């Protein structure tokens, strides 16, 4: 699972419902977007899950609000956002949140 | 999709990997936990997605850190948390975050 630095840092919680549009095109666009995003300054990683009926939650982690804003207005990202609205999504919600605390548990060791 | 109040409020981001343990037992425990949690003071709702290979993200929303702490130490919740560690999960990460901004988009109307 994704390892993040010690808080504080920022999370962008993206929850969405997909249209029934071709999922291979969607997968390609999503991959492209993660590849782009991961090159941005301040990007700390992401976690993404989508279920069989088209509900998804993606959380991306960032070092600052400034770098989230930069990524939001990145030219190539704007193109993909438009594809998302035109083709891939019925609906989405975006929340910007400051991570204040975190802890991890695994069957193998505990660090909280 | 879940409607939340105007920020600020709090998010608990729970990301996990399931064991291969019987998924009907897991579904029952998860349902019980959401039923319990939704009766707690300050609970604002949740979003939860799990994919076919056992990765999941659940985000629960709360009005305050105090109510998150209360829920964390709720006696019945502690029992379910122990079941989670003993049976259902390989690993999980919990992040407590303060939602500062949000916006919504849907094919039908836009409110950001």
Image (cartoon, coloured by chain):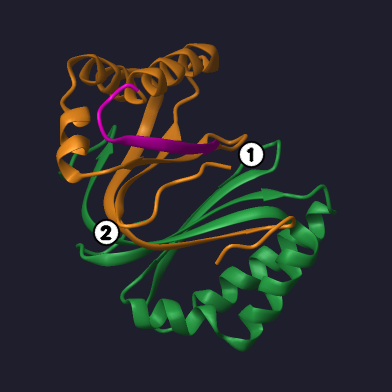
Chain colours: A orange, B green
Give the number of the mark in front: 1 or 2: 2
For the stretch drawn in magenta, what is the main secondary structure?
strand
Is residue B39 shown to the viewer in this render? Answer: no
Is residue B109 shown to the viewer in this render? Answer: yes
Using the image as rendered, state which of residue A90 and residue A10 is in the foreground.
Answer: A10
Whole-Å distance between the Cαs marked 1 and 2?
25 Å
Q: Residue at x 49, y 75 (%)?
A: B38
Q: Residue furthest right?
A: B22
Which chain letter goes with mark 2? Answer: B
Mark 2 crowdedness (10 Å alpha carbons): few <14, some 14-19, many ≥20: many
Q: Which residue is denoted by mark 2 in the rendering?
A: B99
Which chain letter goes with mark 1? Answer: B
Q: Give a yes or no on whether discs 1 and 2 share a subunit.
A: yes
Check the image and report above or below for B74 versus A109: below
B61 horizontally vs B105: left or right: right
Check the image and report above or below for A28 versus B50: above
Residue A109 spot, x, y in % from top left: 69, 58
Using the image as rendered, state which of residue B108 and residue B67 is in the foreground.
Answer: B67
**Helix, strand or loop at mark 1:** loop
Q: Which residue is denoted by mark 1 in the rendering?
A: B51
Q: Residue at x 78, y 50 (%)?
A: B19
Mark 1 crowdedness (10 Å alpha carbons): few <14, some 14-19, many ≥20: some
Name which of mark 1 and mark 2 comes first in the sequence. 1
């Amino acid at each position: 699972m994704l390892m993040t630095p010690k808080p504080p840092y920022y999370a962008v919680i993206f929850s969405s419902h997909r249209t029934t549009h071709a999922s291979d095109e969607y997968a390609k666009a999503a991959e492209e977007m993660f590849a782009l995003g991961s090159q941005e300054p301040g990007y700390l990683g992401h976690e993404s899950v989508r279920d069989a009926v088209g509900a998804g939650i993606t959380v991306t982690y960032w070092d600052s609000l400034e770098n989230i804003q930069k990524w939001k207005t990145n030219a190539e990202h704007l193109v993909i956002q438009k594809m998302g609205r035109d083709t891939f999504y019925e609906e989405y919600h975006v929340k910007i949140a400051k991570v204040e605390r975190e802890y991890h548990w695994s069957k193998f060791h505990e660090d909280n």
